[in-house]
Image (cartoon, helix red, strand yellow):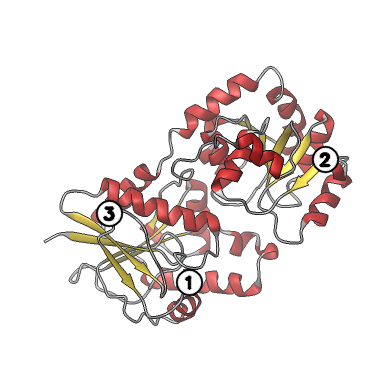
Amino acid sequence: MSVQLRIVLDQAVHVVDADQARAGLALAAGLVQTAPRGCVVGAIVPSGADLQVPGVQDVRMLPLGRRELAGAWQLGITPGVGGGLIHAPSLMAPLVRHDRVHDNDQTTVTLWDLDAWDASNGMSKTTVAWQKAMLKRAVRHADAVVVPTHTMAERLADIARLSDRIRVVAGAAPTGFAQPSDAGVRRQDLQLPERYVVVTGDVESAAVGFRAAARSDIDVVVLDAADGAEPQWADAAAAVGLPERRAHVRGKLANADRAAVLGGAAALIATSTHAAWPWRAVEAMSLGVPLIAVDTGAHRDVIADGGMLVSASEVVDALEDALGAGEQRLRVLASDRSRAFSWASSAERIWALHADL
């Protein structure tokens, strides 16, 4: 009799967080690819899902849509889910009392960031309340809580009484993430300049990147901006000397467009100080883009020697080096470091986690 590990793919119909939705599907494919002998992969999806993941042998479609499931699972109501081995690539999980010893029921969940606790100003009160409520359920009922970096594990240990149930499993760039053959056309369609750097982070932290770009006389592209936030970003750039016309603010892009933007960048400056997985930095490394990052625990864990880790006051000098003599060296370092991350490797760690449990 085979052992089945079921992955929760709650965003199979309605995408709430594009990065986490992509991660869930990529991890599911990785679990299929790395399944030990005698093990198979299933999925739990909300009503209306049309899941297309080759190798997933059993898909249990629940009677509720994602929004209704989020409310029900927050209350501990899990109709139609069943038991067995369950892994959720987010906090969206059927967290209820179960018997791991006698029934071999296991439920593990994932936290990609701790913004609800450390950086809630940019989040809705509803989202913050839901995440905090689900972590409380995880403290009571999860067999393990997965985070992508050791720094996050240390911070989570301060927030929640999870003892030895915190595990570290890194993420990766999207499967097959690469510059498309029509990258130049895509950049033109997005009305980007020929020469630019990408700056990531929130409006406040990104100021150090804007300042460095202004000093180096190069344009800036901002990705993942919220709808209607362009004036706020433009004002932040202008406040540190980068003219509004040289700040190109774009929202969330599909993989191919995002790869075209990142791949065409002279460098990426990661300014966030949050305890979170740096999605864009990992993608940039996979494309061999010179990487400068404000020195934080998360950046040390993930980027390590794949880029320049500097203090906020050193970003100006670091960018000057990345645009000049250090460019080729940084491209090689980024490419080398990117090989440390793959969804197959992450999936192997998840299989090992459930075996340990």
Q: Nearer the viewer, residue 104 or 178?
A: 178
x, y percentage for residue 93?
41, 69
Q: Closer to us: mark 1 or mark 3?
A: 3
Label 2, label 3: how far apart the Cα atoms are: 47 Å
Residue 296 image-quadrant placement: top right
**Is residue 52 rendered to the left or right of residue 149?**
left
x, y percentage for residue 141?
36, 71
Residue at the image point whose x is 60% and y is 60% from the top: 115
Label 1, label 2: how far apart the Cα atoms are: 42 Å
Amino acid type, mark 2:
Arg
Q: SS of the residue at dot 2?
A: helix
Q: With respect to residue 156, does 344 lie above or below?
A: above
**Is residue 124 rendered to the left or right of residue 242?**
left
Numbered disc total: 3
Find disc 3 in the rendering and name its residue. Answer: 55
Q: Residues within 10 Å of mark 3 (few under 14, many from 20)?
A: some
Residue at the image point whose x is 78% and y is 36% from the top: 219
x, y percentage for residue 137?
43, 73
Question: Which quadrant is the N terminus positioned in?
Answer: bottom left
**Is residue 33 rendered to the left or right of residue 343?**
left
Upstream in the sequence, badge 1 or badge 2? 1
Q: Nearer the viewer, residue 5 or 64?
A: 64
Find disc 1 in the rendering and name its residue. Answer: 134
Q: With respect to residue 332, does 237 lie above or below?
A: below
Find disc 2 in the rendering and name its residue. Answer: 246
Amino acid type, mark 1:
Met
